[in-house]
Amino acid sequence: MLYTILPLIAFLSSRVEAHGVVTKIIAGTKTYDGYQPGKFPYMPTPPAVAGWSTPQLQDLGPINSDKVGDPDIICHRNATPGQAVAEVAAGDKVSLQWQPWPNSHKGPMLDYLADCGDDCTKVDKTQLKFFKIDGVGITNTKGTPPNFADDDMIKANNTWTVTIPASIKPGNYVLRHETIALHQAQAAGGAQMYPQCVNLKITGTGTESPTGVPGVELYKVNDPGLVFNIYKQFKANSDYTVPGPAMFSGAAAADGSPAPPAKRAADPVSEASPDLDRRHSRAFPI
């Protein structure tokens, strides 16, 4: 009976809880703004930010997993390139802070990179080829549903941290950061995808240029990680398969840790919050 009631509770809560977008990006020691769809479209001259523009995303909703072959799956609904770039050294960390995330929307956290050539601000998203550098699913099987990576993100002040592989060739890249909500994923098409893209300039001395795949080919609607019943008991973290292509061999494990204190960079960069730690706060709301 409990396993029957839990999906209903999650469905009802999803009707009233907001979802979210990435509002802050901490690359190395500097903090950059993400795109704010509830604010920027109404400004006469919105700031140029590293996060990709999604002006039609005022509802903060998902891309459902029956649309994994649609270009909207790449960087979200009608996304266009961000007009600024965040700089980070290969081997350093990038932390991405979401708006307060609903506890019911449990699922994995994933990160991809795609070389965007000379200029990420003008790239055609359908031509980007992504390789996975991070993918974390269940992190603790205790409880029903179990603890997923996005639960750890919530506990870390709605922030997820990923390491840029040290071996990556320097250049311009699009970071595709994503969480997938599985509370309605018992049947194909029910998973909710929340992709967010950020322009990066990666510096360093690496030499690797991993082969990637187009964003519309990252997933299939029937992938085990997209059709999954979270409302049961699990014995091992590996009982859940993180969807998407294989991890790049040079990727470092994600730690979900809070970001270090930030230093001011040129506009439109802003100071990092001193409260960017594991406390569950509501910093940077739209």
Image (tube, rainbow, N blue to C red):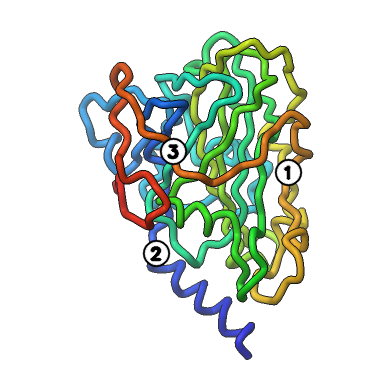
2 vs 54, nearest the viewer: 2
Nearer the viewer's eye, disc 3 or disc 2? 3
Query: Mark 1 and mark 3 in contact (Cβ < 8 Å)?
Result: no
Q: Kindly identify which residue carries mark 3.
A: 259
C-alpha distance separating marks 1 and 2: 27 Å
The residue drawn where x is 49% and y is 24% is: 199
Q: Kindly identify which residue carries mark 1.
A: 244
Looking at the image, tell me whether mark 3 or mark 2 is earlier in sequence order.
2
Residue 121 position (above or below residue 22): above
Q: Kindly identify which residue carries mark 2.
A: 17
Q: Position of residue 107 (x, y in %)?
A: 60, 58
Give amino acid for label 1: Gly
Looking at the image, tell me whether mark 1 or mark 2 is earlier in sequence order.
2
Number of residues whose C-alpha sits closer than 10 Å to that of mark 1, classed few (under 14), some (14–19) or many (20 or more): some
Q: Is residue 82 left or right of residue 149?
A: left
Dot 1 falls on a residue whose secondary structure is loop
Q: Position of residue 27 (x, y in %)?
A: 46, 27
Query: Mark 2 and mark 3 in contact (Cβ < 8 Å)?
Result: no
